[in-house]
């Protein structure tokens, strides 16, 4: 196992009717800006429930944060904060809203002569302070409710870039599984696949004898395989939604990635697909991952065999046959969740590939993966398998 420094200060408040605990979690004199996405938080009553729990505190709202939060929208929230001196941010929504809030929390502390987009260009390394914030999670998927990372899209630059900083961990996150009951099937399916690929990116690399990390990752993957289809079939099943919500959080809170190599090449290629073609993030992952595993199965062979045996219970055949079956089962699982796994499913063809490879170069994504050997040319080869 590699050396590691694990730190996660986010408090999780989990369960039914836990939004009421907001009154205990925030200072009584906090001036709060509520941040959310579309109208669902209002229509379902979640926003009213949050405001009731905040009591007599000063509260204002900022809505309209997109499923892939854009720099252009988030900067409007930054301007509002600077004009009205809010001192606490509360994200109500899924990973996109929470990601956007992380950027807003950092950008609101930038001086006038600083370019907030530089947060993304420097991967968060130039953040030296951020506003405190918490979250009320309504969509299990990204793990943003318990980590220090985020991804933001700049429409004008056709760029989608990640950043992270220890200063943008949520102070707390409320996870009430009942808030997922009214989600569309598309969002639940996306959440399952997103959490699955998050886990794979930290697990399917090469062995370093991280036994606990491996077993935790395998448990998350097995849980998602079991509860994913049930979450679509039984939308009001509390136990299913609770296990899905907690699996998605555990998939990316730093625990299973501590002390082990990580990949993330699938995510970086997927980001370019979203930035250029507007495909849902999870669906880009479902396109890219099977090809990424196939192209790189030699360097990942030991862990792919372990994945085949422990997660998919494949025990017969040669090593290569077991690995190929595991990759096929992964793709079939995504399809079972109703998610297309080829570019053609999104009306894209081979002409899509060269511009994506060029964008990877523009954004410095030229030595991706756990071995830094995924070049734009390798990424292009992956995508050619997914036409």
Image (cartoon, rainbow, N blue to C red):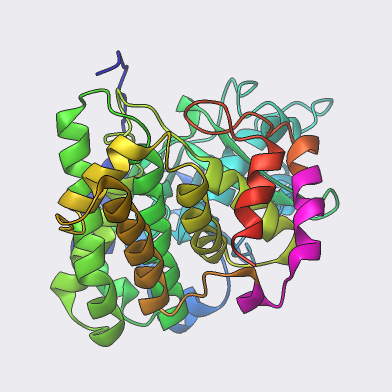
Residue at the extreme front:
318
Total numbered badges shown on the rendered structure: 0
The verdict on residue 373 being magenta is no
> For this view, does 26 lie left or right of residue 41?
left
Residue at the extreme top:
3
Establish if 59 lies above or below 347: above
Q: Name the image quarter holding residue 258.
A: top left
Asked if one can make out residue 357 in the rendered structure from this viewpoint, the answer is yes
Asked if one can make out residue 27 in the rendered structure from this viewpoint, the answer is no
The quadrant of the image that shows the N terminus is top left
In the image, the segment drawn in magenta is 344-358
The verdict on residue 345 being magenta is yes
Q: Name the residue at 38% across, 27% down.
A: 261
Q: Nearer the viewer, residue 159 or 329?
A: 329
Q: Name the residue at 37% across, 72% down.
A: 332
Establish if 129 lies above or below 352: above
> For this view, does 138 lie left or right of residue 125?
left
Q: Name the residue at 23% across, 79% down.
A: 230
Where in the figure is residue 186, as x and y percent of width and height? 46, 78
Where in the figure is residue 30, as x and y percent of width and height? 45, 44
Q: Name the residue at 81% across, 64% down.
A: 351
Where in the figure is residue 232, as x and y percent of width and height? 31, 82
Q: Nearer the viewer, residue 137 or 320?
A: 320
Q: Nearer the viewer, residue 369 or 271?
A: 369
């Amino acid at each position: 196992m590699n050396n590691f420094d694990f730190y996660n200060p986010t408090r999780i408040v989990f369960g039914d009717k836990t939004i009421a605990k907001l009154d205990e979690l925030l200072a009584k004199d906090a001036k709060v800006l509520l941040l959310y996405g579309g109208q669902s938080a209002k229509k379902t009553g979640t926003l009213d429930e949050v405001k009731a729990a905040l009591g007599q505190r000063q509260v204002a709202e900022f809505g309209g944060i997109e499923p892939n939060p854009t720099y252009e929208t988030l900067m409007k929230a930054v301007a509002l904060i600077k004009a009205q001196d809010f001192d606490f941010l509360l994200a109500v929504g899924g990973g996109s809203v929470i990601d956007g809030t992380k950027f807003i929390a950092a950008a609101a502390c930038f001086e006038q002569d600083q370019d907030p987009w530089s947060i993304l260009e420097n991967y968060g390394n130039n953040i030296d302070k951020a506003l405190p914030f918490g979250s009320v999670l309504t969509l299990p998927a990204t793990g943003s409710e318990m980590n220090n990372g985020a991804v933001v899209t700049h429409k004008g630059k056709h760029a989608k870039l990640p950043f992270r900083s220890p200063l943008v961990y949520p102070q707390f996150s409320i996870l009430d599984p009942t808030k997922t009951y009214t989600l569309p099937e598309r969002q639940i399916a996306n959440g399952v696949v997103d959490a699955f690929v998050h886990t794979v990116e930290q697990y399917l690399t090469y062995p370093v004898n991280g036994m606990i990390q491996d077993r935790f990752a395998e448990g998350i993957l097995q849980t998602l395989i079991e509860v994913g289809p049930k979450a679509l079939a039984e939308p009001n099943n509390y136990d299913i939604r609770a296990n899905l919500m907690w699996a998605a959080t555990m998939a990316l809170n730093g625990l299973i990635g501590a002390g082990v190599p990580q990949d993330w090449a699938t995510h970086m290629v997927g980001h370019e697909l979203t930035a250029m073609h507007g495909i849902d993030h999870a669906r880009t992952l479902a396109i890219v991952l099977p090809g990424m595993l196939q192209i790189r199965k030699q360097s990942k062979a030991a862990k792919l065999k372990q994945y085949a045996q422990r997660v998919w219970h494949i025990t017969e055949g040669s090593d290569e046959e077991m690995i190929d079956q595991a990759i096929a089962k992964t793709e079939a699982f995504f399809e079972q969740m109703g998610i297309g796994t080829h570019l053609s499913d999104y009306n894209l063809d081979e002409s899509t590939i060269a511009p994506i490879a060029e964008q990877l170069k523009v954004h410095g994504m030229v030595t991706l993966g756990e071995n830094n050997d995924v070049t734009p040319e390798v990424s292009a080869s992956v995508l050619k398998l997914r036409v």
